[in-house]
Image (spheres, helix red, strand yellow):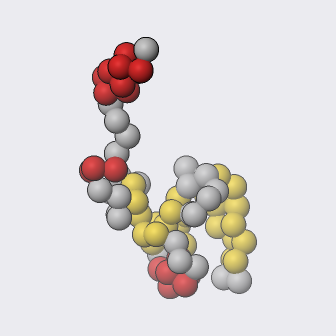
Amino acid sequence: MGIFQHPHLTRGIVRTEKGAFEISRGLVDVPDELGESLGWRSADPENATPASVSASSSPKSGDQVTQRRRKRA
């Protein structure tokens, strides 16, 4: 079984031909072959983040957002 990121749901239950699985924080623990067949992105079980997300795509810090707002004003 692997952890996969559901494409648009953050919580609830997803029902498949292989059974029903709980979604928590957008992550689903399903058999590897099912997650892959549905096209879901694999997630890293160590820190529960998508494996394909790089550090450069992380949200900006509060300081950068504040500086950007000051420039607009």
- Asked if residue 45 can be seen in this view, the reply is no
Q: State the image coordinates of residue 35 (x, y, percent, origin top left).
A: 53, 77
User: Residue at horizontal 66%, vertical 82%?
Assistant: 18
Q: Residue 44 is drawn in which quadrant?
A: bottom left
User: Residue at horizontal 72%, vertical 72%?
Assistant: 15
Residue 42 position (above or below residue 63): below
User: Residue at horizontal 69%, vertical 55%?
Assistant: 12
Residue 23 shown left or right of residue 48 in the figure:
right
User: Residue at horizontal 41%, vertical 20%?
Assistant: 72
Q: State the image coordinates of residue 52 (x, y, percent, origin top left).
A: 35, 64
Q: State the image coordinates of residue 20 (x, y, percent, origin top left).
A: 69, 71
Extreme residue toward the left, this view = 55
- Asked if residue 30 can be seen in this view, the reply is yes
Residue 57 shown left or right of residue 19 in the figure:
left
Q: State the residue in front, 18 or 72.
A: 72
Q: State the image coordinates of residue 45 (x, y, percent, origin top left).
A: 38, 61
